[in-house]
Image (cartoon, rainbow, N blue to C red):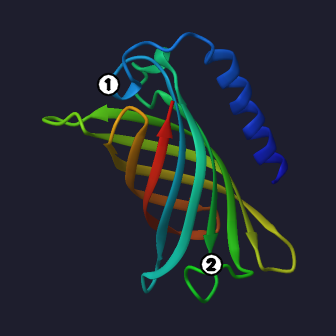
Amino acid sequence: MTGFGRSATLAFVVTVSVFGQAPAPSQSAADGGGTSTDLFIMFGSDFVRPGLVPKANYNIGLGHTFGFLHKDPFGDELTVAYTYENAGSHGFLHTDFGSHTESLGIMKNFPLPGTKKVTGYTWIQGGLTSLTGYPTVVNRFYDGESLGAIIHFNSHQSIWVQEMYNKIVTIPWYTTTSAGYTWSW
């Protein structure tokens, strides 16, 4: 893990331990109240332009919803995530050419009319991408912006489906389509 990733993880853990000590309210964060912590694992594919060549995109992270941020227009859930993307010649298997991204983000969950089982979200991330497979590792700034839906099975389990616009400095923009499992507590 890079220095940025270690720092981001430490900052997230300290934030959750300081602000996450209040007793959990009876209403879940998905219902518009209280706080929750989410562990998410996502699998997806980049569709790299030109040619829409599918490439592996795997993501794992933690998010914590803060009750005092519910009225913030950008988000109420702070996230830290690690993403591996394969940039090699054979899409979903590991190759020497890849990118490893550590990011911090802010997510905004919002209800969808007519349903309580499905909610929407936006997710803005920024971080550092390390490109491997070259004579030296190349580090670049990363920006990711997502729009997605969460299918809630119960107060602890859900599936996320998202479309993400990705931009790494010096690399043309690309989109990522992902689905993943989330455990909340």
Q: Earlier in the sequence, mark 2 or mark 1?
A: 1
Q: Percent position (x, y) of residue 144?
A: 52, 53
Q: Label 1 belongs to which residue?
A: 31
The label nearer to you, 2 versus 1, is 1
Seen as rendered, the residue at the extreme bottom is 89
Type of amino acid under label 2: Ala
Describe residue 133's horizontal placement relative to residue 15 as left or right.
Answer: right
Are the residues flagged by discs 2 and 1 in contact, CB closer than 8 Å?
A: no
Q: Percent position (x, y) of residue 133?
A: 77, 79
Label 2 and label 1: CA atoms lie apart by: 39 Å
Q: Secondary structure at mark 1?
A: helix
Snapshot quadrant of residue 63: top right
Q: Name the residue rendered at 44%, 12% in the picture.
A: 25
Q: Secondary structure at mark 2?
A: loop
Describe residue 100's horizontal placement relative to residue 3 as left or right.
Answer: left
Snapshot quadrant of residue 75: top left
Circle 2 crowding by C-alpha within 10 Å: few under 14, some 14–19, many from 20: many
Q: Percent position (x, y) of residue 20?
A: 61, 18
Type of amino acid under label 1: Asp
Choose between 47 and 23: the one closer to the eye. 23
Q: Is residue 142 above or below residue 17?
A: below
Q: Name the residue rendered at 31%, 41% in the picture.
A: 120
Q: Name the residue rendered at 77%, 34% in the picture.
A: 10
Q: Label 2 belongs to which residue?
A: 87
Q: How many marks?
A: 2
Q: Is residue 61 above or below residue 174?
A: above
Seen as rendered, the residue at the extreme left is 114
Q: Is residue 24 above or below residue 85?
A: above
Q: Percent position (x, y) of residue 115?
A: 17, 36
Describe residue 118's horizontal placement relative to residue 56 as left or right.
Answer: left
Residue 17: which disc?
Answer: none
Q: Name the residue rendered at 54%, 10% in the picture.
A: 23
